[in-house]
Image: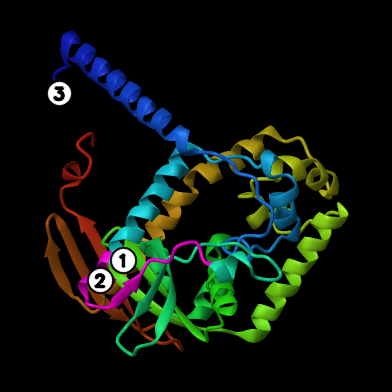
Amino acid sequence: MSAMPAEQIHQQQVNELSAHIIINQIKEGKKKYIKTYPQHVPRASEIGHPCERYLTLSITNWADKKTHGPEVEFIFEGGRAVEELAIKDLEDAGFKVYRPEPDKAIMESKPRITGHIDVRVDFGSGQVHTGEIKGLNIFDWEKLNTLQDFFDSKKPWIQKYPAQLMTYLYIKGEERGFFYLKSIPRFQPKLIWVDLDYSYMEHILQKTERIEKHVANGTMAEQIDNPEVCQHCAFLHICLPEIRQKALEIIDDDELLDKLQKRTELEDGYREYNHLDNAVKNAIHGKEKLLIGDYLITGKWITPKCKNPYWKSKIVLLDPAKINPAV
Ligand code: SF4
């Protein structure tokens, strides 16, 4: 392969540099939307958070809350755009759609929980239902089909969604609302009905009262022991010294630390691979011989001794250079 001429390399570097500068400026432009506002009572969108200390700090120490970066702001903007698409879906279908103004019942609820209802819809029965719209990555969107799936999710922010919707239902005195979920990408719709669960709501109300007491008395709730939640917490910098103190053993091992850091870097790619691998395996299950592009796919039943037979597929890329030109 002949070497690239020097001018061409130089032009490529200039292009990469200018693209980098443009993207940085775009990210800078988003920073003006990232602000922290004073908070006086728990928010419906947060009240399902498993840590009462977090919920208390959100009020008492709102100014210490770590703000998100522009990368997360892009996600929030995308979420707002999805909300508009969802409302358009509902309107296009001919349903009566109401976009509530800040709700008086919510403003005056006791104990106070604040929030903003996304949408209220009459699907034709004459009854208006409160709805919560969420844009979700395709992996999460596929997994959520019942209310229980939200509680079973490993993502702490998905576990919070039922409390948000049920809080609105409770305050408005309604028995039934819905989640309207759109997948990202593909923007497919999914509707999940949610019935108000009074015993779950009782647990949320008691929690809200405990937070109110902490705020009023200047006390602080206990920390939780859940690294999955703490790692995403905007008050981790306040809690970290205590969390470190509680660690059973602190060790100094650069090699292990290096492995842990590399493992973190690879984690997302690994998850995506597994998801795609499962999707591909499902799609080619039972196919004995297939040719798709440059992929040759073969498969057969395998019957191990004393075990159930299973389908085994083999995927061969006939021309790897077409996937990665550098090969
Ligand atoms: S770091 Fe963990 S314990 Fe501390 S407030 Fe956040 S979630 Fe709670």
Identified at 76% across, 56% down, the residue is 53
Q: Is residue 172 above or below residue 290?
A: below
- Determine if residue 265 is in view: yes
Mark identifier at residue 91: 2
Mark identifier at residue 1: 3
What is the x, y in percent for residue 52? 74, 60
Say few, some or many: other residues with alpha carbon within 10 Å of mark 3 (under 14 / 14 to 19 / 20 or more).
few
Q: Where are the magenta residues, as a range?
A: 88-103
Q: Amino acid at mark 3?
A: Met
Residue at the extreme top: 6
Position of the C terminus by quadrant: top left
Mark identifier at residue 303: none
89 in the magenta segment: yes
| Dots 1, 2 in contact, CB < 8 A | yes
| For residue 249, side relative to residue 166 (left or right) | right
**In front here: 167 or 228?**
167
**In front here: 245 or 215?**
215
